[in-house]
Image: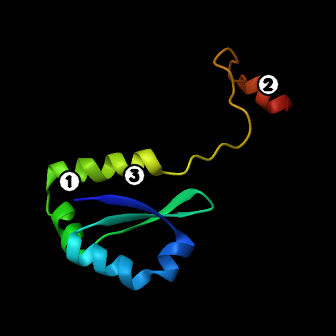
Amino acid sequence: MQTKLIASTEAQNNFGRVLDDVVQNNTRYIVRRRNLSQAIIMSVTDLERVLSGDEHERRRLERIIRETRPVYSIGDSISDSVHPLSAEEHRLG
């Protein structure tokens, strides 16, 4: 089983070919938009196999999702050295 990355516009422009590849060759496609992974195209047979408890395929798919998932970062991380506010500090604002 092969997994391919494809841009959303390429997937849109070649949807018939992508669908044929998915169904006939058991290929999975990760669709990327604005350089971020947004969706996975896979055959119904492939999905049934994953859902039926094929542990190897489930782990493989989880790994692929983890490796290609978009990473969002908003704001700065709070340092471990910062301690939580006490109830009194919360009350005082």
Q: Earlier in the sequence, mark 1 or mark 3?
A: 1
At 51% from the left edge and 80% from the top edge, which residue is drawn? 12
| As drawn, 36 above or below 6 | above
Circle nearer the viewer, 3 or 2: 3
- Check disc 3 and report the residue beneath it: 65
At 67% from the left edge and 14% from the top edge, which residue is drawn? 81
- Check disc 1 and report the residue beneath it: 57
> As shown in the figure, which amino acid type bears the numbered disc 1?
Glu
Q: Earlier in the sequence, mark 1 or mark 2?
A: 1
At 57% from the left edge and 46% from the top edge, which residue is drawn? 71
Which quadrant holds the C terminus?
top right
Query: Dot 2, how many residues are within 10 Å of its Cα: few (below 14), some (14-19), or many (20+)?
Result: few
Q: Quadrant of residue 47?
A: bottom left
Does residue 23 appear left or right of residue 70 in this picture?
Answer: left
Q: Position of residue 23 (x, y in %)?
A: 24, 77
Per the model, the C-alpha gap separating discs 1 and 2 is 51 Å
Does residue 89 appear left or right of residue 34 in this picture?
Answer: right
Q: Position of residue 28 (x, y in %)?
A: 32, 65
| As drawn, 42 above or below 34 | below
Residue 89 is marked as 2
Q: Mark 2 falls on what kind of element?
A: helix
Q: How many marks?
A: 3
Per the model, the C-alpha gap separating discs 3 and 2 is 42 Å
Circle nearer the viewer, 1 or 2: 1
> As shown in the figure, which amino acid type bears the numbered disc 3?
Ile
Q: Position of residue 32 (x, y in %)?
A: 52, 62
Does residue 51 appear left or right of residue 64 in this picture?
Answer: left
Residue 15 is marked as none
Which quadrant holds the N terminus?
bottom left
Q: Earlier in the sequence, mark 3 or mark 2?
A: 3
Q: Position of residue 8 (x, y in %)?
A: 54, 71
